[in-house]
Image: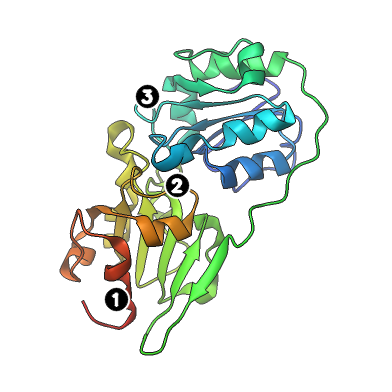
């Protein structure tokens, strides 16, 4: 059990009604989209997983966004705890970076997650106006000759029922939410794509892949260093495949290959 004023969530996309005014210890990646959700939930401060930092430092993109509003924010090392599991983050997470307001509150690199959250909870927080969510967080690609759509979503939470049968490119991490296989993908897509978040503690960054294999869904991750986590367009255009399940392998997916040509073959019904 955590202290009063501190909220643990496995994903920042599902905040409870009483989230406002609390420190959000969220085992989501620390990218801009995730941070926007915490700020729109009117957090007093937040701690995320750094997801290996990755391309353009996207895994910690929230640090600067929070600093601009004077709100404390930190990330824990992806190697210190399992991304997607807040209880493990609370127990094992170690701070890898913190913004100015967090440092002034007493947060420091190497500090345990629980101690950092308590330091934030004891600090003052300015009144701020939450920023809008990033534009174009969801788009659907179709082209002549394609037999299925490619859906780009900056967060797996943006998947819709109509995406069943599509190739779903999420910019979310590839770890199971709360370790629950049922949450690997909200629909029975043809394929699911994720960011490996740097691999992470216990190899959790690809744990959705076997769960989707059990459902007959092709699944793969792209390397965090190759594409910005939280940015589906970057995943699609820049991503380099880092892990595949057996279904994806049978359809021609190979580790080290660029993602976009593979997905366009699948969209055309070829492999």
Residue positioned 73% across, 45% down in the render:
131
Q: Earlier in the sequence, mark 1 or mark 3?
A: 3
Q: Residue furthest right?
A: 127
Q: Give the image location of residue 105, x and y in percent.
A: 66, 13
Q: Write down the residue under mark 2.
A: 229
Badge 3: residue crowd in 10 Å (few <14, some 14–19, many ≥20) = many
Specify the quadrant of the image occupied by residue 68. Answer: top right
In depth, the one of 99 and 77 nearer the eye is 99
Q: Do labels 2 and 1 touch, CB within 8 Å?
A: no
Q: Which mark is residue 2?
A: none
Q: Write down the residue under mark 1.
A: 266
In depth, the one of 86 and 239 nearer the eye is 239
Q: Give the image location of residue 181, x and y in percent.
A: 38, 52
3 to the left or right of 173: right
Badge 1: residue crowd in 10 Å (few <14, some 14–19, many ≥20) = many
Badge 2: residue crowd in 10 Å (few <14, some 14–19, many ≥20) = many
Q: Earlier in the sequence, mark 3 or mark 2?
A: 3
Q: Which mark is residue 80?
A: 3
Residue 23 in sight in this render: no
Could you say whether the residue bearing mark 3 is in a helix, strand or loop? loop
264 to the left or right of 186: left
Q: Earlier in the sequence, mark 2 or mark 1?
A: 2
Q: Do labels 3 and 2 touch, CB within 8 Å?
A: no
Count the labels in the image.
3
Indicate the quadrant containing the C terminus: top left, top right, bottom left or bottom right. Answer: bottom left
Distance (Cα) linking label 1 and label 3:
36 Å
Indicate the quadrant containing the N terminus: top left, top right, bottom left or bottom right. Answer: top right
């Amino acid at each position: 059990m955590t202290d009063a004023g501190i909220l643990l969530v496995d994903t920042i996309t599902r905040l409870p009604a009483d989230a406002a005014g609390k420190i959000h210890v969220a085992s989501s990646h620390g990218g801009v989209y995730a941070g926007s959700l915490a700020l729109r939930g009117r957090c007093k401060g937040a701690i995320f997983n750094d997801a290996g930092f990755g391309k353009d430092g996207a895994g910690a993109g929230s640090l600067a966004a929070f600093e601009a509003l004077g709100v404390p924010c930190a990330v824990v090392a992806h190697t210190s705890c399992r991304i997607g599991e807040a209880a493990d983050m609370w127990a094992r997470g170690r701070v890898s970076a913190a913004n100015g307001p967090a440092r002034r509150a007493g947060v420091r690199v190497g500090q345990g997650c629980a101690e950092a959250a308590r330091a934030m909870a004891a600090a003052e927080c300015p009144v701020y106006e939450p920023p809008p969510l990033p534009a174009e967080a969801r788009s659907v690609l179709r082209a002549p000759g394609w037999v299925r759509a490619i859906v780009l979503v900056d967060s797996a939470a943006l998947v819709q029922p109509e995406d069943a049968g599509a190739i779903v490119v999420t910019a979310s991490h590839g770890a199971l939410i709360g370790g629950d296989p049922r949450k690997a993908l909200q629909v029975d897509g043809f394929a699911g794509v994720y960011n490996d978040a740097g691999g992470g503690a216990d190899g959790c960054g690809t744990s959705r892949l076997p769960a989707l294999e059990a459902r007959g869904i092709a699944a793969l991750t792209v390397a965090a260093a190759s594409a910005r986590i939280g940015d589906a367009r970057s995943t699609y255009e820049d991503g380099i495949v880092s892990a595949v399940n057996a279904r994806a392998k049978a359809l021609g997916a190979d580790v080290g290959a660029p993602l976009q040509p593979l997905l366009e073959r699948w969209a055309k019904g070829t492999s």
